[in-house]
Image (cartoon, rainbow, N blue to C red):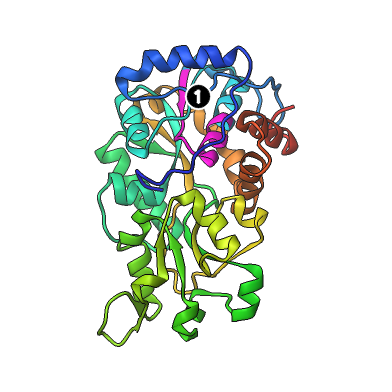
Amino acid sequence: MFVTRSQQARWRRAGLALLAAAALTAIMAGCGLKAASQFIPPAEAGTVKPIPALDGVELTVGSKDFTEQLILGKIAVILLDVAGATVTDNTNIQGSNAARKALEGGSIDLYWEYTGTSWISYNTHTKPIKNQQRQWQVVHDEDIKENGVKWLPAADLNNTYALAVREEEAKNLDVQKLSDLEGLDTSDLTFCVESEFANRDDGFPGMLETYGMSLKQGGGKKVIPSGNVRNMETGVVYTATDKGTCNFGEVFTTDGRIKGLGLRVLEDDKQFFPNYNVAVTINEETYKQHPQLAQVFEGVTNELTNDEMAVLTSQVDMEGADPAIVARDWLKEKGFVT
């Protein structure tokens, strides 16, 4: 969930909206943003109703450029449209830093962000905080004070790193949690990871260290031979793990391909990986003018969990559905819109 943490969105632009998006992309190229499809599925009020104070208020919504963010961005666009705002859809911004700069600079008014990403990448801290609520609180306090970014309450959805193994091999090796890896034969400890994860202290090396393993000789840890670790693109890791190219693959916990491919996520029983709970972040000036925005997102945030998002991302990544339709249908299913 950092700057280079990209999952290529399988984005289907719809009808004339494609032409509009292309035109807007050209306009925005100079400021580093990339517009998504402007397609907003029709929706009417459900439990989220029009808010008089937001009637006609012009708001610009952003998102990053991977599947989960595209869905979340469309959820925000649809909700604000139903609430009565005049919404500009600038979702599908390439890279976390670009999205964050757009928010701080006022090019967008709000987007969904992750606590761990802000704490480590934007607030430049190196040590994550284990407690999810505490992690959100310190990010909230520091961001409003130092950067003019308002954080709404976070969801249970925690899109953090994990290791997964295909179910058949998990049963064969009898592994359920990361602590089980240390007891395996070295020949079974084969890993597929992306290059960034492979080199981050809060990624692969730190995980190995925490669970009694190392890539280097000495220190009394079980040594993983360099030939046991294969670096590859993020999207390839899932299929490579499923096909047995390696036994253990780096995954993101809300990715629908985990369930779609029948992979088992190993429990991080020592809580090594940082928390990446998602929340709506709003430009402070926008929030001061329109504090009613918190009301729009309150119920939706409470419904966002890893299981819910895994289903939604699977519909896009495994079935080829349009993120905008997936977002709208989920909001209808939950009764937020009709």
Q: Does residue 189 sit above or below 283 in this rendering?
A: below
**What's the residue at 46%, 72% (across, down)?**
190
Q: Position of residue 177 (x, y in %)?
A: 54, 75
**What's the residue at 64%, 45% (across, down)?**
314
Q: Which residue is mark 1?
A: 36
Q: Position of residue 298 (x, y in %)?
A: 57, 38
Q: Position of residue 170 (x, y in %)?
A: 61, 74
Whether residue 302 appears in this view of the structure is: yes
Dividing the picture into quarters, in which one does residue 125 lie? bottom left
Q: Nearer the viewer, residue 92 or 127?
A: 92
Q: Nearer the viewer, residue 262 or 108?
A: 262
21 relative position to 137: left or right: right
**What's the residue at 27%, 36% (across, down)?**
147
Q: Position of residue 238 (x, y in %)?
A: 55, 56
Whether residue 252 appears in this view of the structure is: no
Q: Nearer the viewer, residue 227 or 284?
A: 227
Q: Is residue 65 magenta?
A: yes
Q: Residues within 10 Å of mark 1 (few under 14, many from 20)?
A: many
Q: Does residue 232 sit above or below 13 in this rendering?
A: below
Going by the numbered disc 1, the residue's amino acid type is: Ala
State the extent of the magenta-drawn residues as a range.
59-74
**What's the residue at 30%, 63% (across, down)?**
201
